[in-house]
Image: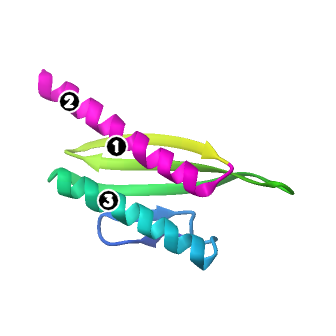
Amino acid sequence: MASGDINMGGKISLVGFSELDGASLDIVRKVVGAFAERVSRQDRMFEGLKVTLKELHKRVKGEIYEVHAHLFKEGHKFNSISTDRNLFVALDDALKNVAKEAEHAMGKMMRK
């Protein structure tokens, strides 16, 4: 794990979030932790979650955040990317979208 990575337990890691202020980082940890807990309760095949933050543009009026979510489940990796001026909106969208992606793909696999 790189020096800026934050490990939230064996299955969850945050990359690029170490530059955030303490209050924002606490919110990110709670949101990601609650998401991972919900996914692992619903699906015993949950293997891990990696969330990466990239600041695309720093401007006077604010940054643009890009959040990548990678969900590992049943030997598969599901990905989602969301971009927004609000970090928490981007994070929420990325997590919701990666869950939908995994659910859709696993549903297709089950039907085969």
Q: Disc 1 versus disc 2: distance between alpha carbons? A: 12 Å
Q: State left or right for residue 109 relative to residue 4.
A: left
Amino acid type, label 3:
Ala
Precedes in sequence: disc 2 or disc 3: 3
Which residue is the site of mark 1? 99
Residue 96 lies in the magenta-colored region: yes
**Within-10-Å neighbours for mark 2: few <14, some 14–19, many 20+:** few
Q: Which residues are magenta?
A: 85-112
Outermost residue on the right side: it is 60
Residue 62 lies in the magenta-colored region: no
Amino acid type, label 1:
Ala
Q: Secondary structure at mark 2?
A: helix
Q: Main secondary structure of the magenta part?
A: helix
Which residue is the site of mark 3? 36
Outermost residue on the top side: it is 112
Q: Position of residue 109 (x, y in %)?
A: 18, 28
Which residue is the site of mark 2? 107
* Residue at the spot 56% in from the left edge and 51% down from the top edge: 89
Amino acid type, label 2:
Gly
Q: Disc 1 versus disc 3: distance between alpha carbons? A: 10 Å
1 and 2 marks in contact (CB < 8 Å): no
